[in-house]
Image (cartoon, rainbow, N blue to C red):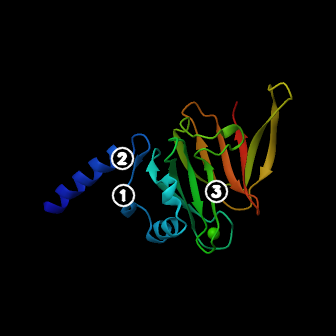
Amino acid sequence: MAIKYRLVILIFIFSLCTANGQPVSPRLLPEWFVERYESLELDRRYELGAYLNPLFLEGDFNGDGEKDIVSTLVNSENGKLGLLIIFKSSEEYYIVGAGDGFGVAGDSFEWVDYWEIFDSKTAYETTFLDNGDVEGTREVTIRNVAISIRESEGSGGLIYYDGEKFTWIHQGE
Ligand SMILES: [Ca+2]
């Protein structure tokens, strides 16, 4: 009974935390990820604030056989929302959004309603004409898994590692 009660409280706290970039307890994230986040001193400039559900996603983004992690991140200085990706078996980390421009996705991800791991090998990227009108779509091969972010109407894109850096594939209008 006591356990059940605690679980209800925990779920309540969790749902409060995921509202709009509120700081989250590091205990909700994998230990190695939080340790790396702190040793990189990213906590001086950012907060592991939640604005998407779930708080983090796991996937082998660089294809080295180890599952990496991406979590939601908030820039402490200006409140801009983004993502932090840390590779499990290297010192590398990447921040997209949270104050840094990331293609059409912009420098803050308020517009994002859903996110998930994209594990299909083929993606379709929307291409645009110079005047900004939609030209069509082109097929892109995804070597490893990507991160899909989108708004409720369906527009969004994929964040994927091309072997050197994370790039943006725009999908929808
Ligand atoms: Ca990996």
* Distance from the alpha carbon under mark 1 to that under mark 3: 29 Å
Figure check: 57 above or below 125: below
Q: Mark 2 Cα within 10 Å, few/some/many (few <14, many 20+)?
A: some
Q: Type of residue at label 1? A: Ser
Q: Mark 3 Cα within 10 Å, few/some/many (few <14, many 20+)?
A: some
Dot 1 beta carbon under 8 Å from ligand 1:
no
For label 1, the SS is loop
Report which residue position mark 3 lands on: 119
Q: Residue at x 61, y 67 (%)?
A: 87
Percent position (x, y) of residue 137? Answer: 80, 37
Percent position (x, y) of residue 130? Answer: 86, 29
Report which residue position mark 2 lands on: 17
Give whichever of discs 1 and 3 has the lower sequence position: 1
Q: Quadrant of the N terminus?
A: bottom left
Label at residue 25? 1
Is residue 54 visible to the viewer in this orientation of the structure? Answer: no
Q: Residue at x 72, y 41 (%)?
A: 103
Res 155 quadrant in image: top right
